[in-house]
Image: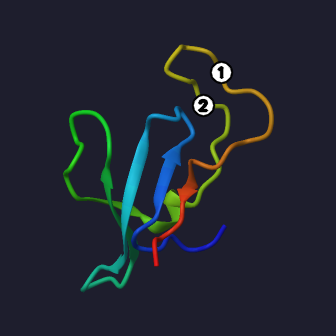
């Protein structure tokens, strides 16, 4: 998967309504650890700027329960996938 880029919208594997606007990638000033700076476009955190560990953003999900209580079956999905690319 390509590095998240500012201006993109990504969707969480748990639902089409769970979308996030990506501001870009940032580095911690002391540790230089990579993080994705993003904002949920839904729910109680909509409009709040958040950070997620870069590696976690790119992970696949294994044996995870969906909100319906069902266990996800089939190929492991990406935690987050690209919905729309940056507008130029």
Residue at the image point whose x is 46% and y is 67% from the top = 54
In the rendered view, tell whether residue 51 sits above or below residue 6: above
- Residue 35 screen position, x and y as percent: 38, 70
In the image: residue 41, left or right of residue 11: left
Is residue 68 toward the left or the right of residue 30 in the image? right
- Residue at mark 1 to residue at mark 2: CA–CA distance: 6 Å
Task: Say few, some or many: other residues with alpha carbon within 10 Å of mark 1 (under 14 / 14 to 19 / 20 or more).
Answer: few
Residue 83 sits above or below residue 5 on the image: above
Q: Which mark is residue 44?
A: none
Quarter occupied by the N terminus: bottom right
Identify the residue under disc 2.
64
Of 41 and 13, the residue lying toward us? 41
Say which element carries label 1. Answer: loop
Q: How dense is the environment of label 2, judged by Cα within 10 Å: few (below 14), some, or many (20 and up)?
A: some
| Residue 23: quarter of image | bottom left
* Residue 30, percent from left and from top: 25, 85
Mark 2 element type: loop
Q: Is the C-beta separation of discs 1 and 2 under 8 Å?
A: yes
Tell me which residue sits at (67%, 39%) in the image. Answer: 62
Pointer 1 residue: 71
Residue at 57 percent of width and 39 percent of height: 13
Horizontally, is 33 left or right of 46 in the view? Answer: right
């Amino acid at each position: 998967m390509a590095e998240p880029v500012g201006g993109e919208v990504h969707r969480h594997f748990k639902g089409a309504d769970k979308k996030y606007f990506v501001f870009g990638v940032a580095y911690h000033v002391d540790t230089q650890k990579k993080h994705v700076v993003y904002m949920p476009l839904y729910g109680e955190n909509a409009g709040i700027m958040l950070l997620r560990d870069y590696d976690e953003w790119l992970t696949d999900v294994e044996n995870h329960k969906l909100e319906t209580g069902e266990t996800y079956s089939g190929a492991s999905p990406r935690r987050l996938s690209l919905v729309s690319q940056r507008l130029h």
